[in-house]
Amino acid sequence: MSKNSRLVYSTDQGRVDREQESTLAPITDGVVRIQRETKGRGGKAVCVITGIPEGKLKECCKLLKSKCATGGAVKGYTLEIQGDHRDRIKALLEAKGFQVKLAGG
């Protein structure tokens, strides 16, 4: 190596993982929000539900999918229910004791 060379790449410090930051549950204000999204889905509508506590996500997803007779999934800390069922979802979640708001336009 010559005197004028400088370090370009080194594996000395190892991989830098930022996954720990994203594994923490988001802080919510106790309000469940329901919004309709179509971006990136070929124009198909999806209800995205945020603000449900982590322990009740799967239970709520199963209930909503059966009552709305549609598909859905838990993605991260949100629920995605296929189709535009905002009014029905709001009524079901309020019956379960959640404070619910319709978000978006």
Image: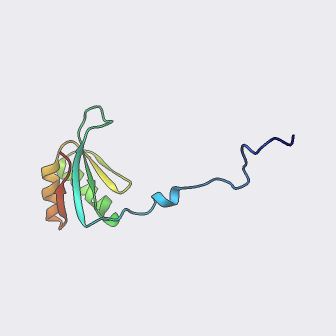
Residue 55 in the image: state x and y as whole percent.
34, 66
61 vs 86, nearest the viewer: 86
Question: How many numbered badges does the structure rendering display?
Answer: 0
Quadrant placement of the N terminus: top right
Colouring scheme, one of rainbow, by chain, secondary structure, one colour: rainbow
Q: Residue furthest top?
A: 42
Residue situated furthest right in the rendering: 2
Instruction: Name the residue furthest front.
Output: 4
Q: Quadrant of residue 40 in the image? A: top left
Q: Position of residue 74 (x, y in %)?
A: 34, 53
Q: Is residue 73 left or right of residue 101?
A: right
In the image, 39 versus 84, the foreground residue is 39
Residue shown at the point (19%, 65%) measured from the top left? 98
Camera-nearest residue between 4 and 88: 4
The C terminus - image quarter: top left
Residue 1 shows in this picture:
no
Q: Position of residue 48 (x, y in %)?
A: 27, 49
Q: Where is residue 67 drawn, in percent x and y? A: 17, 52
Q: Residue at x 72, y 50 (%)?
A: 11
Question: In the rendered view, would you say 74 is above or below 27?
Answer: above
Q: Does residue 70 appear anywhere in the picture?
A: yes
